[in-house]
Image (cartoon, grey):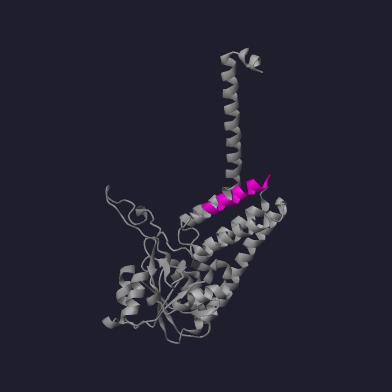
Amino acid sequence: MLSLWTSISWKTIMQILIYSYAQSTINKFIIFKIMMDKLAKIKQVVEDIKSITIQGATNIAKAGIQILAQELKKQKFNSLSELKIFLAKASMLLKNARATEPMLFNGLKLISTKYQVESTKSKDIIQLQKKLSEAGEEYIAEIEKEEELRPAIGAKIIKNGYNIVTHCHSGSVVKVLTTARKAGKKIHVYNTETRPLYQGRRTSTELVKAGVPDTMIVDDAAPFFVDNMYESHVDIDMIILGCDNIKLDGSVYNKIGSFAIALSAWHSKIPVYVVGSLTKVDMEKKIEIEERSGKEVWPEAPKGLEIINYAFDMVPAKFITGIITQFGIIKPKDLKKAVKKYYPRMAH
């Protein structure tokens, strides 16, 4: 064998090594390209989330889990390893789309746990893909069932003649308000414009279309408008907010500006309710507040100017009267107990 190698010129040896390296690199590129192709639709949803084309925690969760379930079902994988890599990469892409979406994260965790359990029982890739896809579809069905239950529960606490303030756009909040209106209650909603992307316009459009009297107020005026101690021209009876993230201590993360509105309400002893599924409970201790591009605030800002554009802030539990969930109104102090009771899988 040694004599064989010594009879080959160094030039030939280098050519063999270069060819071998090139072939290995090409193979790796092909594998990478195939995986990127499989992830193409996942990436599109991620971009839609980042650009706010898909907005609202529930819509984000449904869109993310739906596309993952679809791709898990239709893509072809040659091995369990390839399936595992796809699931890990797809989950990471979706998780990094926004940092404050536990409803999405909990769905991804559910599918990942399903893989860990089922992959030890069987090596049938197609059957495993089917089970993972079904887990995602079941999670979406669970979310949709919650959406059916919450509006009526929330509408019950709204009394006839109430003036209500809300912020940003939450499909769940809009459903609570329109349900109260359909029940014959005369209410008036005041909602913020929600700069810099004006999500409040969507809220106003949906409320007006549903026949709910609505008035838009500028963001900076909202805390002053809410504080009844300054005898504004409107007495506010209730604040109803959506949320992207619920912590176990009962505090919530919502669109930036929510803190100031809730603080003002707390100062004036006005009840603050948050509409949110228990699947939005975030078991992580720390959360990263998303900071978006300053170009959203001022596209033609002077060169060198720094713009801070936080997407979310936190409403402390002490400001919150109750969280409107599919299981009823839960006080912040009782949240941990409720999660353990209704979603024991999340408590681990």
**From the viewer's perspective, is residue 348 above or below residue 36?**
below
**From the viewer's perspective, is residue 223 above or below residue 284?**
below
Q: Position of residue 47 (x, y in %)?
A: 50, 52
Asked if residue 212 can be seen in this view, the reply is no
Q: Position of residue 211 (x, y in %)?
A: 49, 77
Q: Is residue 75 left or right of residue 159?
A: right
Quarter occupied by residue 70: bottom right
The magenta stretch spans residue 82: yes
Q: Position of residue 301 (x, y in %)?
A: 29, 51
Q: Main secondary structure of the magenta part?
A: helix
The magenta stretch spans residue 286: no
Q: Pick whichever, 1 or 169, lies toward us.
A: 1
Q: Is residue 262 left or right of residue 2?
A: left
Instruction: Write down the region rendered in magenta.
Output: 77-92
Q: Is residue 201 left or right of residue 140?
A: left
Q: How many marks?
A: 0
Q: Pick whichever, 155 or 120, lies toward us.
A: 120
Quadrant where the N terminus lies? top right
Q: Residue furthest bottom?
A: 160
Quadrant where the C terminus lies? bottom right
Q: Is residue 328 left or right of residue 74?
A: left
**From the viewer's perspective, is residue 335 above or below residue 89?**
below
Residue at position x 49%, y 62% from top? 101
Asked if residue 321 can be seen in this view, the reply is yes
Q: Position of residue 310 (x, y in %)?
A: 36, 60
